[in-house]
Amino acid sequence: MIHESESAAGGAVARRLRARLSRLDGTTAGGGRPSIAVFDHHVVPTNPVGSRTLALLSALADECDFTVFAISFDNPRPDRIRHVAVPVTRRPLVVQYGCFHAVAALRYAVERLRRGRPFDFVLSADAIVLFADIYYIHFCNRAFLRMTSCPIRRDSLMGILHWANHALQAAVEPFVFRRASSMIAVSQGLARELDDAFPGTGGKTRVIHNRIDVGRLRRPDSFDRAAFRAGLGLDDRDTVLLFVAHGHFDRKGLPVLLAAQRQLADPRTVVLVVGGSDQGLRPYRAMAAEPGAGRVLFTGSSSDVRPYLWAADAFVFPSFYESFSLVSLEAAASGLPVIAPRLHGIDEYLVDGVDGFAVEQTPASVSGGIRRFLALTAEERRAMSAMAQMIAASFDMAGLDLLWRELLKDWQRMRPAPG
C-alpha cells in the first residue's frame, strides 16, 4: 500500500500546494491563526526527532501560534513560540518517558487554565502523551520488539533499562494511535509498518518524509580536508569509513561494522566512529582494542558532524531498525556513498551500485559491501559521490512549510465545529 505522501522531488507538488493554499481562507474555528500545542522531549538541532519538530516550528512560526511543551528547546522564534518547560529527569530513558507523561499532562492542564480556551489541536512527537490529536511518528516500538533479531542485549542493567523503555512505549502505542485523528509517518515503510502493527488505524496515516538542508551539507571550498584528516592521524592513502550515532549502538549495527572491519584485515581501511559518551562507547572500544580488530578511531560526541562527513570516503551504517535514517541521508547529501541495509527511508534513496551499496546486517555482507566500494576506481567513486548528492537533493527542506500547512489545514477542515 502506498500512503498519501508528498513527492520527494517537491517542485510539482509545491506548485499545486501553493495554488490550493491560495484558495483557502486560513481561518480556524476561533478565527485567526491556529493554536497548536506541541509535545516533544528535546527540541534541539542535535536530536534526530527534535530536529524534525524544530523544522516544523521554524517553517510555520508565522502561520500558527505554537506552545511547545519540552524538556529542552532551542527556540527559533521566541517572539512567536511559547515554551512551557517540562522538568523531568533525563536518565534512564524509561524513567524520562514515564515522568514526561505525568508532568507534561499537568503542565498542559495549567496552560489550558491560563489561556482560558482550548488549543485548536495537539501534536505529539511519538507516543509521549496520551491526549494528542496528531502523532508525528518516528519509531514503531511494537514492530521493533517483534523483530526476530531484536538487537537489545538484556545481560546488563543498561540493556534491561533500554529494553524497558521500548516495552513501555510499545504498550502505550496501541491506545494513543487508535484514538488519534491523524498520524504522520516519516517514510512509506514506517507507514506500512504502522498499518500492520495497529490494524485499527488504517486510513489515518500520511507521510511527510524527513528532509534536510542540502546546502548546509555541501563541502565548502574553504574546508581543508587533508589538514582535518591529519588531525585525526589519517592521510590521503587511508580509506575512511564513517559511522555516526548518538547512542543505541547495538541497534545501529556498530558491533557488526567492527566485526566486518576485522574481516577486511586492511591496514589502510579505517573505521571512524563519531558520537556517543565514554560510558556508552566502553564495550565497543574494548572490541576495537582486541588483536586483529583493525584500525578504529572513536571521536566521542560532536555537535557538528559535517567536518567528519567531508573528511570521510564512505558512510557505513548496518543498522537493524530505522524509520528514516537522517544521518544516512545527510551523508549522501555530503557526497558519501552509503553502505547500509535498505531499511525504511533508506530504501527510498539507496540504489545498489548507483549511490552506494545495499548490505545485510552481517559482518560478511558488510565487509562485502565495503570491498565493492574499495574496488571502485577514483573516477567511479566520484561518479557515485555525485549520484549520492543528486538523489539526496530530492529530500531538501524546500517546500516543507507548504506540506505541513496542507496537512494541518486538511485536518482542521475535518475537525467538528465547537459546541
Image (cartoon, rainbow, N blue to C red):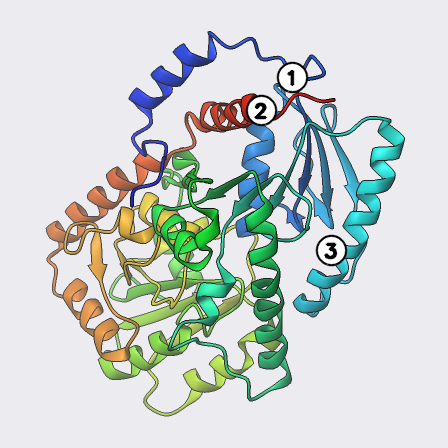
Which badge, 2 or 1, is on the more N-terminal residue? Answer: 1
Compare residues 293 and 253 and report the one nearer the observer: 253
Residue 342 vertical position relative to residue 54 in the rendered view, above or below:
below
Say which residue appears at 43% left-offset and 36% top-offset.
Answer: 213
Label drawn at residue 28: 1
Residue at 67% across / 17% down in the picture? 29
Q: Quadrant of the C terminus?
A: top right
Q: CA distance from mark 2 to mark 1?
A: 7 Å
**Where on the picture, by quarter, is residue 154?**
bottom right
Q: Mark 3 highlights which residue? A: 101
Looking at numbered disc 1 in the image, what kind of residue is underneath it? Thr
Answer with left or right where residue 416 lies relative to residue 408: right
Badge 2 element = helix
Q: Which mark is residue 412?
A: 2
- Residue 112, percent from left and from top: 83, 34
Q: Are marks 2 and 1 in contact (CB under 8 Å)?
A: yes
How many angstroms separate mark 3 from mark 2 (CA)? 25 Å
